[in-house]
Amino acid sequence: MKQLIVLLTVIILASCRGGENKAGQSGEELAPTPKTDTIATPKQPDKTPAQSGQSRGAETTEPSEILASIDKHLVSTAQFKAVPGGGITDCLVTVTNTLPDVSFQKALVEVTIKKADGALVKTDYYTVVNIDPGMSKTIKVPNNNQGSSVTTAVVKVKSTELTNGEFVLAGTPR
């Protein structure tokens, strides 16, 4: 009977081995994934430097230079339908990572809606997560009954390669 208890104890302990690390690699709890309204687009085929407009030297650009001109590397564009008399519908903002060797764990995108005369209607911020090299993510922007134009800009990024995992301001101040 003692042998059976010892055997069961050994089996239980063996099955629990490493259980303290199941929440995360370093023992921390896993954070819930933030909700974002994005649609992943499959990775595009790699382009040669001549096709992409980048020189081979772009790969050796300093992180601070990339962050200062982030809108050239993490490109955001808006597509929408303008409603006669004012308003926008079916607005989609696409964020594309053009860097060949940098992934972004998080990016904060500023979306500004303006009237025809340039007056500000509203500015919203959207978070996009996990943008690998060559990948695009799409954000759905709610319809607006006053705007006639949409501008976008990446204002904050988090990247292991560029920011050492910190979420930092990027681009030029507006």
Image (spheres, rainbow, N blue to C red):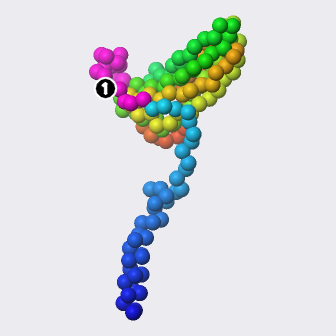
Q: How many marks?
A: 1
The three-letter code of the residue at mark 1 reads Asp
Q: Secondary structure at mark 1?
A: loop
Q: Residue at x 46, y 37 (%)?
A: 130
**Residue 51 part of the magenta-drawn span:** yes
Q: Residue at x 47, y 22 (%)?
A: 75
Mark 1 crowd level (few <14, some 14–19, many ≥20, 10 Å Cα): few
Magenta part of the chain:
41-58
Residue 44 visible in this rendered orientation of the protein? yes
Query: Which residue position is annotated with label 1?
Result: 46
Which image quarter is the C terminus in?
top right
Q: Quadrant of residue 5?
A: bottom left
Q: Is residue 164 above or below residue 57?
A: below
Task: Pinpoint residue 120: horizontal percent, then vertical percent.
Answer: 70, 16
**Residue 112 part of the magenta-drawn span:** no
Task: Pinpoint residue 119: horizontal percent, then vertical percent.
Answer: 71, 12
26 vs 3, left or right, is: right
Q: Residue at x 51, y 19 (%)?
A: 77
Residue extending farthest bottom? 1
Residue 114 visible in this rendered orientation of the protein? no
| Most foreground residue, 1 or 74 | 1
Q: Is residue 56 above or below residue 4?
A: above
Q: Residue at x 65, y 7 (%)?
A: 84
Task: Pinpoint residue 97: horizontal percent, then vertical percent.
Answer: 43, 27
Q: Is residue 65 above or below residue 51?
A: below
Q: Is residue 53 above or below residue 129?
A: above
Task: Pinpoint residue 139: horizontal percent, then vertical percent.
Answer: 54, 28
| Most foreground residue, 62 or 102 | 102
Which image quarter is the N terminus in?
bottom left
